[in-house]
Amino acid sequence: MEEETTIVATKTTCYKCITGFDSYLNSNAYSIICPKCGTLYTIYNGVLEKTTEIVNIPENPIYIPIGTSGIINGIKYLVIGYAYKKENGTNYCWQEYTLFNPIHGQAYLSQYEGHWTYLTELNKLPLVSKDGLTAIFDGTEYNLFSRYKAELIAARSEWIYRFSTKEMPRVEEFVIPGCMISREQTNVNITWYKGEYIQPEIIKKEFKVESMPEIIGVGAIQPFRGKFKTEGLRNLVILLVAIWGIAQLCFLWTAKEEIVFTQAFTINDSLNKKEIYSKPFDLKYGTTNAEVKVSTNIDNNWMYTAITLVNEKTGDLYDVDMEAEYYHGYEGGENWSEGENWVSKVISQVPEGRYYLIIYPEKPTNMASVFLDISVARDVFVFSNGLIILVILGIFPAFYFYRVKNFEKKRWYYSNFSPYEDDEDD
């Protein structure tokens, strides 16, 4: 932090109400208000000159008293003024504290619904788009948030420029999370400011504030306070998806997918709903999956088959229900089809050994016979397993980005330039 500079106030007396008050700007002041009667003076060259204007004295709480000092971004400021303003034609009101440092000059603290913004004057002009909806400053694009006229309701302050209660500057605010740039235009002057969101606890600590206003909603430039940065989490998600994709390819390449059993059966009325035993076959490669597939000749019909995989040595049983449905036709000038005349299911974690199948067929009564072609494949690639892992990996990022988007919707809720469409659920 820079070397501390002490500001010594000058005592001044109001001509109208004979009240003594302090001027912190001293010879730097141009306009000043009597804190008791609200008379507006010019004080250029240190001499009070009364104007015809009267400023309302603030009635609402002043959270940072005039004369209080505090540090923002390493700069020690003195609070020299307070103004209570509103958006002309609406009920939106905010507080504005004028800060002063002998080296850095004036700055401002704006407080609206418990959200604080630190504003300093820009030394170069942003580039505003032709449609006026964006502005670029130092390579960053800001989006138009609000456009209004600022009306002074009450004040207790002094300024380094000529102040008038009759002025109603036109304000345009362009925002991104955490920052804003604003243009304030009067009949004779245009001033640009850059605003930075300051967490309320910092204001309370640095200015030793006893009480703070309640925080309401999401501030116009309030940043999302998550443990992760959005860009960093997005990059992490991309990395995880890439790793997942590579892992899936590896599983696909290393899967044996060996057909270890095939056998055809003809199911007629005498065999319907009766047990049929297959010939035995061997499953190798340790403990891994096995895929059972049933192909049929059904057409506009269905076929149900219950199959039990039996380990000859241990007697362990693995049951699967297999139902194939296949229908098709012509309707409305178009061909249509639904289902397949085959079905397959994967049995997980089947130890190696010698096995056979017990088949329980159930054919439709409107078919004299049904042909079944049953096969068993060992160590097959199962995409659904990887998909489940992908879904699990995506739960937290999806929830996080949902929160961020919902936060942004709340930020833009009262803006006339919101990029989000109105939603009844919000």
Image (cartoon, rainbow, N blue to C red):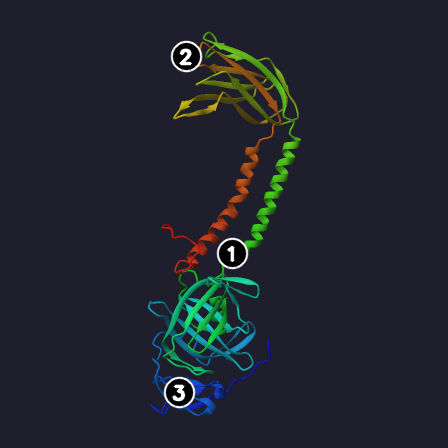
Q: Residue at x 58, y 31 (%)?
A: 382
Q: CA distance from mark 1 to mark 3?
A: 48 Å
- Is residue 394 in view from this perspective? yes
In the rendered structure, find residue 366 and report the number of the disc placed on it.
2
Identify residue for label 1.
Answer: 226
Three-letter amino acid code at disc 2?
A: Asn
Q: Secondary structure at mark 1?
A: loop
- Please tell me which residue lies in front, 344 or 182: 182
Q: Dividing the picture into quarters, in which one does residue 57 lie?
A: bottom left
State how many labels appear. 3
Q: Dividing the picture into quarters, in which one does residue 383 lie?
A: top right
- In this view, the residue farthest toward the top is 270
Query: Quick one: label 3 or label 2, which is nearer the N terminus?
Result: 3
Q: Residue at x 60, y 23 (%)?
A: 377
Q: Residue at x 46, y 70 (%)?
A: 183
Q: CA distance from mark 3 to mark 2?
A: 104 Å
Q: Secondary structure at mark 2?
A: loop
Identify residue for label 3.
Answer: 41
| Figure check: 398 above or below 329 | below
* Coordinates of residue 151 in the picture (x, y in percent): 37, 74
